[in-house]
């Protein structure tokens, strides 16, 4: 059984290195990005909403209680080798994950009484807390009512078999030709073969300029002529 005090970054699990989390701190909140523009002859500034949120820093305080020097070096090497933009989760918040990049590690302090290292790890993270409940796959072949438990529109991942139409509320995706099974990533605004990776954007049409999203609350999803497996990808701030 994995300890509650674990930290996972990509494929690197802290407890495999004898590293345990004893605390976590995050910036108070993310910020909505707003540009201030000064207009000549007009009092006050004009604020332009960029319709996005800024990154924030999440810091974990960790300890190693045995073979600290070797384990610390191995653990930091593994984290740095893992790369950037990785799934970040911990046992302190089992209901959600983040997407982050290791910014660095503070030099550890060594206890005078035993072989114990204490150190901080700082991660530059996206503003979203990705709910694990939003990772559940939902098979849809006809009509399905889905409930978004957050305030934020979610951009789903769709695994589609066959040609047809997928309606998410009033927004529709039409697949004109069925080749191999297709993945439609509404966040990345991309469609491609699930096995081949071949780009299939030319095989789909949208009712609007943007790929569909699932708004807050209840939404009906209707599938016609094809079948789909939907991963909603709920998130909150």
Image (cartoon, rainbow, N blue to C red):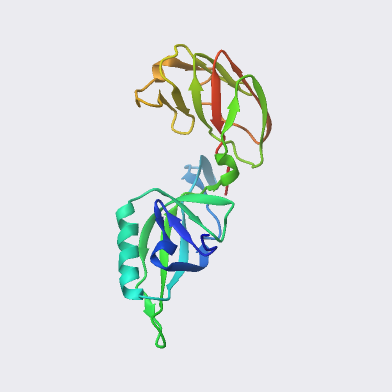
Q: Position of residue 52 (x, y in %)?
A: 50, 42
Q: Would you say residue 210 is visible in this rendering?
A: no
Name the outermost residue toward the front.
1
Left or right relative to 116: residue 30:
right
Front-most of 31 and 10? 10
Q: Position of residue 59 (x, y in %)?
A: 46, 63
Front-most of 68 and 155? 68
Q: Position of residue 141 (x, y in %)?
A: 60, 20
Q: To which quarter of the image does residue 225 belong?
A: top right
| Residue drawn at point x = 53 percent, y = 53 percent | 30
| Residue drawn at point x = 60 percent, y = 43 percent | 133
Label count reads 0
The correct choice, above or below, for 147 with respect to 20 in the image is: above
Name the outermost residue toward the bottom.
113
Left or right relative to 105: residue 155:
right
Q: Position of residue 90 (x, y in %)?
A: 51, 58
The correct choice, above or below, for 70 with respect to 180 in the image is: below
Q: Would you say residue 36 is visible in this rendering?
A: yes
Front-most of 43 and 147? 147
């Amino acid at each position: 059984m994995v300890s509650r005090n674990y930290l996972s970054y990509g494929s690197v699990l802290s407890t495999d290195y004898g590293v345990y989390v004893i605390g976590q701190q995050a910036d108070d909140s993310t910020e909505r990005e707003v540009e201030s523009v000064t207009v000549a002859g007009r009092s006050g500034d004009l604020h332009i909403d960029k319709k996005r949120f800024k990154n924030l820093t999440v810091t974990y305080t960790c300890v190693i209680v045995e073979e600290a020097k070797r384990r610390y070096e191995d653990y930091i090497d593994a984290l740095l080798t893992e790369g950037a933009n990785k799934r970040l989760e911990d046992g302190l918040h089992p209901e959600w994950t983040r997407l982050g990049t290791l910014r660095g590690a503070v030099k550890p302090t060594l206890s005078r009484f035993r072989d114990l290292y204490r150190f901080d790890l700082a991660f530059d993270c996206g503003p979203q807390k990705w709910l694990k409940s939003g990772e559940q796959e939902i098979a849809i072949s006809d009509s399905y009512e889905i409930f978004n438990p957050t305030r934020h529109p979610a951009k789903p991942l769709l695994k589609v078999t066959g040609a047809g139409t997928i309606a998410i509320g009033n927004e529709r995706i039409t697949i004109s030709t069925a080749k191999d099974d297709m993945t439609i990533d509404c966040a990345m605004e991309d469609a491609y073969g699930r096995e081949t990776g071949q780009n299939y954007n030319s095989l789909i049409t949208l009712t609007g300029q943007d790929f569909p999203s699932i708004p807050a609350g209840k939404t009906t999803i209707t599938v016609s002529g094809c079948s789909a497996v939907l991963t909603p990808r709920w998130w909150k701030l």
